[in-house]
Image (spheres, helix red, strand yellow):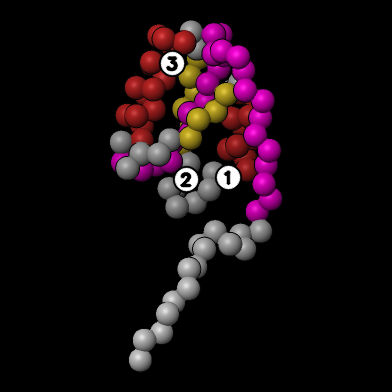
Amino acid sequence: MTEELGFIDPTAGTGRKRVPLAPRPADLVGKVVGLLDNTKEQGTLILETLGAALREKYGVARVVIRRKEHYSKPATDALIDEMAKEVDVAIAALGG
């Protein structure tokens, strides 16, 4: 009595609208970079290290680090809006 299970797409039917990607700057010199911590282990350390490297190697003026409420939840609209007003470029962390 073998029943075959089909593939289940866990992202299907979320109903969230797709947002187009923002234009990319030619370089990062003088830019404010936002780093979004996903709250997973080592995420903060990874982002702090990345921020330091971006300032040193690419001339980033300032790094802003924000933290999501929980790794299993998307960032709130308020957090995304706050970062969008403050930064030129944003990067999401994937700590593990």
Say what secondary structure mark 3 lies in. helix
Count of marks placed on residues: 3
Q: Tell me: 20 left or right of 70.
A: right
Task: Determine whether 51 is above or below 78 in the image.
Answer: above
Q: Tell me: 46 left or right of 33.
A: left
Q: Can residue 61 be seen in this view?
A: no
Residue on which disc 3 sits: 54
Q: Position of residue 36 (x, y in %)?
A: 48, 34
User: Of circles 2 and 3, which is in front?
Assistant: 3
Residue on which disc 1 sits: 76
Residue on which disc 2 sits: 69
Name the dominant secondary structure of the magenta segment: loop
Q: Position of residue 33 (x, y in %)?
A: 53, 21
- Depth check: 13 or 38 in front? 13
Q: Which amino acid does label 3 sit on?
A: Leu
Q: Earlier in the sequence, mark 2 or mark 3?
A: 3
Q: Dot 2, how many residues are within 10 Å of its Cα: few (below 14), some (14-19), or many (20+)?
A: some
Say what secondary structure mark 2 lies in. loop
Task: Determine whether 7 is above or below 43 in the image.
Answer: below
Point out the stretch of residues depicted in magenta: 16-41
**Magenta run includes residue 48:** no
Q: Where is residue 19 in the image (x, y as percent from the top left)?
A: 67, 42
- Depth check: 13 or 5 in front? 5
